[in-house]
Amino acid sequence: MPPLKFKKILWSTDFSHPADEAFEWALALAERLGAELLVRHVLVPVEHPLIDEELIEKAKQERAIEINEKLLQYVKRARDKGLRSNSRVLEGRSWEAIVEESQKEGARLIILGVKGAGALESLFTGSTFSRVVQSSSIPVLGIPPNAGTPRFDRILVPTDLTPPSFKALDLAIKISEHTGSTITLFHVVSTGDIDIPPETLTALEERVFKRCSSVLRRKKTKVEVKVEVRFSKEGDIEREIVDFAETSDQSMIFMNSHTRKGILKWLWGNITEKVLRHTFVPVCVVKT
């Protein structure tokens, strides 16, 4: 088995049910990868000119003690599985504190709970998840409600066939080498209202397979990778991704946040966000 290039996973919690579901995935993945699990909570400071600073500081210290006791319960579960783990209470704006801590600790993956399909107002309150994704230089795995028992047997990697879009495939392969996952490269062709002859569609599908096969040969991986192509008249790429992921029982989806430049870059980033909004399958966003 090849050496794992990242040894630390950071999971942050607000002690909500979605965060607890995300912990189960963080714990299971850390165990599979042999990674250290960093357990964190962000304490948002209270600032008001009418509140005495000494009272704020005292309340903050008392709250930090209480939170640390809770965090140690998660650390204990990780250590009971033989994993390295530690906890810390951070302070500041949630998304900034999480990103800064991941950089400071040298984490290579952030795992957060997402509050629900249809509401990318994700972890904690506000849009912490989306802001972490936007600001983090490392992958961020979002666990939606009802994601189920952690499993890693099938990973879906949507691609628009550009070189940047295959960056998520690199991480999927790395994870698969340690989890035994199979990978499906998934490409959607938007045909619009044009009535394309069957032979043309077949030829186009063959070109997609050829392109993906060429990429896989260069990566020289022993991981099983399948290629799936879908044609969509509506051009609803995100719906095709979500439908395939859920009907084929995928464990996780690995996607890029951006690929091409200009309007195409925005469109692909928007597709990633929409997938996050509408699926119950965990989504790992890889920055490009």
Image: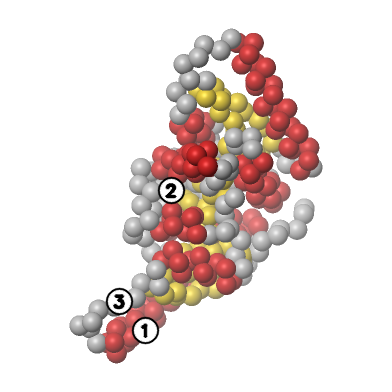
Disc 2 is placed on an element classified as loop
Disc 1 is placed on an element classified as helix
Crowd tier of the residue under label 2, counting other residues whose Cα lies within 10 Å: few below 14, some 14–19, many 20 or above: many
Q: Are marks 3 and 1 in contact (CB under 8 Å)?
A: no
Q: Earlier in the sequence, mark 2 or mark 3?
A: 3
Crowd tier of the residue under label 3, counting other residues whose Cα lies within 10 Å: few below 14, some 14–19, many 20 or above: few
Q: Is residue 176 visible?
A: no
Taking the image as shown, residue 29 lies to the left or right of residue 72, namely right
Residue at the spot of label 1 = 61
Given the image, on which type of amino acid does mark 1 rest?
Gln
Residue at the spot of label 3 = 46
Residue at the spot of label 2 = 144
Q: Residue at x 78, y 40 (%)?
A: 218
Q: Nearer the viewer, residue 4 or 97?
A: 97
Disc 3 to disc 1, C-alpha distance:
12 Å
Nearest to the eye among marks 2 and 3: give it. Answer: 3
Position above or below: 129 against 269: below
Q: Nearer the viewer, residue 11 or 94?
A: 94
Q: Residue 70, position in %: x, y?
A: 41, 72
Q: Residue 133, position in %: x, y?
A: 49, 55
Q: Residue at x 29, y 84 (%)?
A: 56
